[in-house]
Image (cartoon, grey):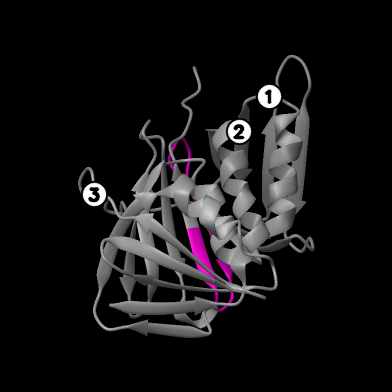
Amino acid sequence: MFSLKLVEPRILNGVTSILADFITEATFSIQKDGIKLVAMDPANISMVVLNILPSAFTEYSVEAPEEFTLNLENFRQALKRAKPTDAISMTSEKNKLKITVHSKSTKRFFIPLLEREGKERKIPALEFMATAELVANEFRDYIDDASIGGDAAVFEADKTVFTISAGETGNKVHIELTKGADALLQIAAKDAVRATYSVEYLKKMARAAALADTVSVQFSSDYPLRLDFKSLNKLAMSFILAPRIENK
C-alpha cells in the first residue's frame, strides 16, 4: 500500500510525456527510496531509467515495495486535468491507480492496472572514456542546433573540449565548449573520443532538460551514450542510447 501527494503536477506531467515518446506501457516500482522505472524502447535502441525522489513529494508513504503497470496515455490524460497550482495524490485501489486532483473541487480518476509484459530490464554496466557535465537547458539547445545539420550528431571530447557537430555535405553545425565555459560545468576524458548518435532520439531525451538543472554526458568512441538529467532533491532521469556506427 502506498499514498503519495505532490504539489508540482509538472513533474509527473513532464515525466509521463517524455516516457510516452519511448514506450506505451510503463511499469513503475514504488519503493521507500523513490518511484523507479527501467524500460527499453521497442526498437531496443534506447533505455530510460527514472527515479523520482521522496523529497519531490509533500507526502510519501510506502508500506512495502509495490509495482504497477499502466497505459501511459491514460495516465498522461488524467494528469493533464490538474492545473499547475493543484495538488495531486495517488494510491492503488481495486486493481486501479487512483489519482485525486485537489483544486477548487476534488476530482478522482481511476486508471486500470495492467499485466506486466516482458521481463524486468537491467541497467547495463558501462564504462566510459569521457564525461561532460552541462547546464541542462543549454544541452537541449545544442541538440536542437544539431538537428539543423542532419539526422546524426557527432559527439567528441578530450581533456578540455567537448563538441557536438552535424552535417557533412549540406547544412553544417559545430558547437564547441571549452573547459571553463559557463555552460560546461565539468569535463574529463581519458583520451580523445568520438561517437555518432541519432538526433531523433537525442531530441526526445533532451526534453528532460525541462525537469532538470544539469545533465551528465558520458560516452566512448563508437559506444553507447548515457545522459543523466538531475534536479536536486526531486528526480533523476537517465537515458542510454546505442551509437550509430559510421562507415569507415
Pick the front one: 237 or 131 = 237
Pick the front one: 51 or 106 = 106
Residue 117 rendering spot, x and y as whole percentages: 23, 44
Query: Which numbered circle lies on residue 199?
Result: 2
Q: Which residue is outermost to the left?
A: 119
Residue drawn at (69%, 51%) of the image = 139
* Side of 89 relative to 94 (left or right): right
Whether residue 131 is visible here, answered yes or no, is: no
Tell me whether circle 3 and circle 1 mark residues in contact (CB < 8 Å): no
Q: Quadrant of residue 69?
A: bottom left
Which stretch did the figure color magenta? 220-237
Q: Badge 3 is on which residue?
A: 116
Which of disc 1 and disc 3 is earlier in sequence? 3
Residue 11 rendering spot, x and y as whole percentages: 58, 65
* Side of 82 relative to 74 (left or right): right
- Amino acid of disc 1: Gly
Distance between the alpha carbons at the discs numbered 1 and 2: 8 Å
- Amino acid of disc 3: Arg
> Is residue 111 placed above or below 152 in the rendered structure?
below
Which of disc 2 and disc 3 is earlier in sequence? 3
Q: Badge 1 is on which residue?
A: 150
Whether residue 224 is visible here, answered yes or no, is: yes
- Number of other residues with Cα within 10 Å of mark 3, as a class: few under 14, some 14 to 19, many 20 or more: some
Is residue 231 highlighted in magenta?
A: yes
Q: Dot 2 lies on which element?
A: helix
Residue drawn at (67%, 49%) of the image = 162
Distance between the alpha carbons at the discs numbered 3 and 1: 37 Å
Residue 82 rendering spot, x and y as whole percentages: 62, 64
Tell me whether circle 3 and circle 2 mark residues in contact (CB < 8 Å): no
